[in-house]
Amino acid sequence: MEEMRYGRSALSIKDAALRLADSAASMLGLLGRPIDADALLHKAVAETGLSDFGDDNFLEPLRIFLASCASEAALGLVGQSATKWDVLRFLVNLLRMRDAERRDSGILQEEIRQPIFITGLPRSGTTFLHRMMMADRRNRAPLVWQTIYPYPDLGFRPGARDTRIARVARSLRMFEYLAPEFRALHPLDATSPQECSEINAHVFRSMRFDSNYHVPSYRHWLDADIERHMPAYRFHKRFLQHLQHQAPGGGSQWVLKCPEHLFALRAIKAVYPDARLVFVHRDPVKVLLSVAKLTEVLRRPFSRHVDPRAIGRDESARWLDGTNRMVEAGDDVGLSRPVCHVHHIDLVTDPVSTVDQVYRHFGMELDEPSVAAIGQYVMDRPKGGYGPRDYHFEDHGLNAAEEREKFLPYMIRFGIAPEALPGPRGEEQPRTGSQPEQSLSG
């Protein structure tokens, strides 16, 4: 099967068929219609037999998101169907979580002690660090299948086969069929640790939507007021309480990861005053093309129109803001312990010692079984499991020198060495500084 190559117009037979179906649907007036939030709310109630969503502060962002989808996202047939499925799933989960809380008051009594939040630019090594730390059985993280289906199916009886992991695995295979480049960019399985953006998406306050869709109105609404992150992180804590209550025998230390956390440091401090924070640093110009490419790959199955150059501009602006927030925070965001700073080059050259550095920073101890498990994880996944890449600045309308100038204050502040950048059409620029050949994007 011929896949779409980066920066080329050739479409595979599958892609062409999807575009043809979208064109026919558009001519028939089936696309561009607003998705009815009220209809999905009623459907969730009918499906579950429940009617109490709890706090209704998710309604405003839900309506803004769906309106932005209708006017800006250019959803295709797959995009419309996937969006309705996604929203309905979130609403059903909200109803079932609230019902569980009414039945068992112990859920909201669960203590989430000193959670570790790993954040930094996307593709800087945050995923690699997170997954290495999950090799320590004393740690726990929300897993992909748990964030999609936090509770078994209605009518599930103890002792019966729980099909949630298998269902999520099928969904991931379907998405990889629609977006075959995804796995090389972001290896993910049903049992992988998941980013917190999937949790916050339940209350429709998450950059996950901005990654999957071109929804600038929704994004501007979310960015407009820092207080808008507070409901997301209050819900985030509730979600962890639900997972912890269902599996009290799991690891006792929550380790959480998401680049999105950079934009909600005050909310994290307010909801988790004893939180521990890790910033992962890497040359932002090096990872920018990878971020833009991943966004392009995520959007393409759902949208009739994807503009790589607009994505490049948007991602550059977004993560310039992210680096500025790290510079502003420095070592102290008002938590009980200073920020722990980790550099990508250290993750690459000495991963076990880097994890040990994080543990020592927070007064923790990395035991021998965990050292062995981390070493095995690294050996089993060369380059973190990521595939080859072929990125060029011109494909996303960016200029390497201009991007280097914009991000320079961040690099100086944290002592980040510049990395080699791709030249036009595969011509590699000379390396700046001493950098290893190996690189991790997660």
Image (tube, rainbow, N blue to C red):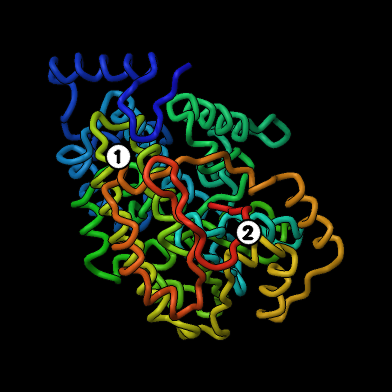
Please name the residue shown 60% across and 65% down the image: 345
Tell me the element at label 1. Answer: helix
Q: Nearer the viewer, residue 144 or 240?
A: 144
**Reading the chain from its start, which is encountered first: label 2 or label 1?**
1
Q: Which mark is nearer the camera, 2 or 1? A: 2
* Other-residue count near label 2 (Cα within 10 Å), few / some / many at <14 / 14–19 / ≥20: few
The reply to whether residue 52 is visible in this rendering is no
Q: How far across and down, in percent of the image, does residue 404 sit?
A: 36, 65
What residue is disc 1 on?
41
- Image vertical order of residue 381 relative to residue 405, above or below: above
Q: Is residue 49 left or right of residue 18?
A: right
What residue is disc 2 on?
436
Q: Nearer the viewer, residue 55 or 146?
A: 146
Q: How many badges with numbers are in the image? A: 2
Q: Is residue 185 left or right of residue 409?
A: right
Cα–Cα gap, marks 2 and 1: 52 Å
